[in-house]
Amino acid sequence: MQKKNSNGKNYIGLMSGTSADGIDAVLVCFSSPRKLKIKATHKQAFSTEIRAQIQTLIHSGQNDLEAAAELDVILGESFADAALHVLEQANLSVKQISAIGSHGQTLRHRPNSKHPFSIQIGNPAVIAARTGITTVANFRIADIAAGGQGAPLVPAFHHWMFRSSRSNRVILNIGGIANVSYLPSDIKSPVLGFDTGPGNLHLLLGDPYFQIAPPKSTGREYFHLGWLKAFMEKLPHPISAQDVQATLSHLSAQSIIQAIRIWLAGTNEVYVCGGGSHNQHLMAILKENLAGACLQTTEALGLHPDWVEATAFAWLAHRTLTGRPGNLPNVTGAKKAVILGGIYKAG
Ligand SMILES: Nc1ncnc2c1ncn2[C@@H]1O[C@H](COP(=O)(O)OP(=O)(O)O)[C@@H](O)[C@H]1O
Ligand SMILES: [Mg+2]
């Protein structure tokens, strides 16, 4: 029998973002203070069929409950596969893992509606049953119930992992939607965080979303192809696909730059993570326009940009199991800090 790791706690983090490109899985060992070690990583692309099902259900008007419930279970199986993959890769046994933290796949995020909600699928009971590992999931709803946006939830982890007493840092996660965490050097100043808008989804700067002061969060219900078409119909002449693409790239960059300039003016250093950190064009525009701040990827702080989000959900599961809050009320707008997530026990 393998011995339990006495120096820290092993968690698996599972993440699938708005891009619906696939599952990011990490096996990470947390030890205090502020130490973590990634033991295994795995990217599991969704099949064309699963991606098509997600794309269908992600848009408003598609309210097929049965299809959503089935996809919930199908994704639960996929998330379980991804977890078992990193477990095998790390050469650890089920007993050596404290829990899985699974973000799930967002189908709807409506924190501002009359009856606010956020729906993430990827059935956690299925994940717990298939892996034999206790699974924490549905992280957003407790924050929403406490009056918050339910998002972003990663700033608490960013603060734990990346803060510095010497400089004001921004962690910029560029996925389908981009979000920022502002980590002030002064421990007494509050951490800030919000979604800046589309990251790789690409869309347009005159939109009122960009002017709204945080707390704010958004998703594909708002930034989608119909949003772009409505904008293009207002143009006097049709423009080429290449011009649309180039414009959208700039829009993603400019909305991020604008958000940092207006709301996070004291920023000294920016560290990028998420798939957008691989987009050299986007990174070059950011670098040029954020000249007052040093721009690098989170690799410079010891965590590869591809695994920050999944690691954050492993960390959030750790918070939940140890009875500690995971939200930052100042970021999400919740009335108070709350313990996040439902716990689905294995066995
Ligand atoms: N090499 C690359 N060049 C440009 N863009 C990339 C590259 N790799 C990934 N991306 C972009 O990153 C997105 C996925 O990033 P990810 O952080 O997984 O986002 P999400 O959390 O929304 O799934 C892809 O949809 C793609 O647009
Ligand atoms: Mg992704």
Image: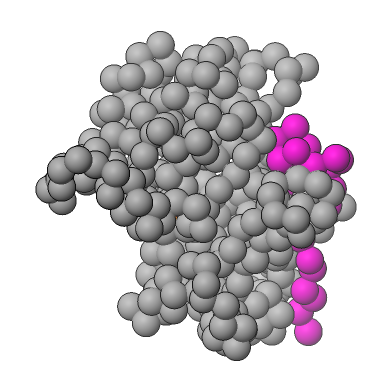
Quadrant of the snapshot with the C terminus: bottom right
Relative vertical location of residue 248 with respect to residue 113 in this rendering, above or below: above
User: Can residue 211 be seen from the camera position used here?
Assistant: yes
Asked where in the image residue 204 lies, by quadrant, the reply is top left
Magenta-highlighted residues? 326-347
Is residue 120 shown in magenta?
no
- Is 251 above or below relative to 295? below
Give the residue displayed 42% in from the left and 16% down from the top: 293
Residue 343 lies in the magenta-colored region? yes
Rendering coords of residue 157 (x, y %): 65, 41
Q: Position of residue 31 (x, y in %)?
A: 70, 44
Q: Quadrant of residue 63?
A: bottom right
Q: Position of residue 302 (x, y in %)?
A: 48, 36
Image coordinates for residue 168, horizontal then vertical, percent? 57, 17
The answer to whether 29 appears left or right of 208 in the picture is right
Quarter of the image with the N terminus is bottom right
